[in-house]
Image (tube, helix red, strand yellow):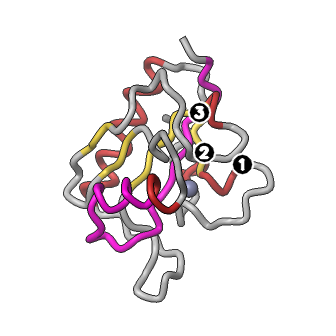
Amino acid sequence: MRKIKYIAVHCTATSQRTSISAIQSYWKNQLGWKMPGYHFIILPNGEVVQLLNVELVSNGVKGYNSNLINIAYIGGVNDKNEPIDNRTIEQKASILKLLKELKKQYKTAKIQGHRDFPKVNKACPSFDAKKEYENV
Ligand SMILES: [Zn+2]
C-alpha cells in the first residue's frame, strides 16, 4: 500500500461549467501528463467522480504526489480568473463525505489545501481547507 501522508484539497481553477473531459484533455495534451491531476473530482451537483485508483500516483502537488491523495472541486475562480470559494452546497457536502471516508482508511493522513504545501504560490483551493477540515 502507498504511504499516504496528506489528502490534498484542490479546486480545478476553471469555470464551474467546465467538463471533466475538457480538464482531462488539458492534462494530457497541454501538460503532457500520463496520469490525471486528481484522484477524485467533485462536480457542482455533488457527484464524486473517481479518475484514478488511490494506490496510483496523481499529479496534484509537485514534489509530494507519491504520498498524496488529491481531490478537487470544479470551480474556484470567478469570471476574471480570480480565486473565489464558489463551492456549491452539494460540493461542500460531498467533499466532507469523501474526506471522512478517506480518513477512515488513511487515519494518519493530514488534510490540507494545495496552497498549504511549502513553496506553493497558488490560491488553490480558494479557501482554508486546513482549518475547515481540521476535525475530520
Ligand atoms: Zn491545486
Quickly name the residue at label 1. Answer: 117
| Residue ranking furthest to the bottom | 80
Tell me the quarter of the image containing the N terminus: top right
Checking the image for residue 112, the label placed there is 2
Image location of residue 26, percent across then percent down: 43, 61
In primary-sequence order, the first of circles 2 and 1 is 2
Checking the image for residue 21, the label placed there is none
Question: The residue under label 3 is which amino acid type?
Answer: Leu
Image quadrant where residue 88 sits = bottom left
In primary-sequence order, the first of circles 2 and 3 is 3
Ligand 1: quadrant of the figure: bottom right
In primary-sequence order, the first of circles 1 and 3 is 3
Image location of residue 83, percent across then percent down: 53, 75
Question: The residue under label 2 is which amino acid type?
Answer: Gln
Q: In this view, does 59 lie above or below 14?
A: above
Question: Considering the numbered disc 1 on the image, is that residue within a helix, a strand or a loop?
Answer: loop
**Would you say residue 16 sits in the magenta stretch?**
yes
**Which residue shows up at 57% across the image and 62% down it?**
124
Question: Considering the numbered disc 3 on the image, is that residue within a helix, a strand or a loop?
Answer: strand
Looking at the rendering, the stretch of residues picked out in magenta corresponds to 3-26
Which of the two residues, 28 or 114, is positioned nearer the viewer here? Answer: 28
Q: Residues within 10 Å of mark 1 (few under 14, many from 20)?
A: some
Image location of residue 44, percent across then percent down: 25, 61
**Which residue shows up at 47% across the image and 88% down it?**
80
Mark 2 or mark 3, which is nearer to you?
A: 3
**Would you say residue 63 sits in the magenta stretch?**
no
Image quadrant where residue 104 sits = top left
Quickly name the residue at label 3. Answer: 68
Which of the two residues, 59 or 28, is positioned nearer the viewer here? Answer: 28
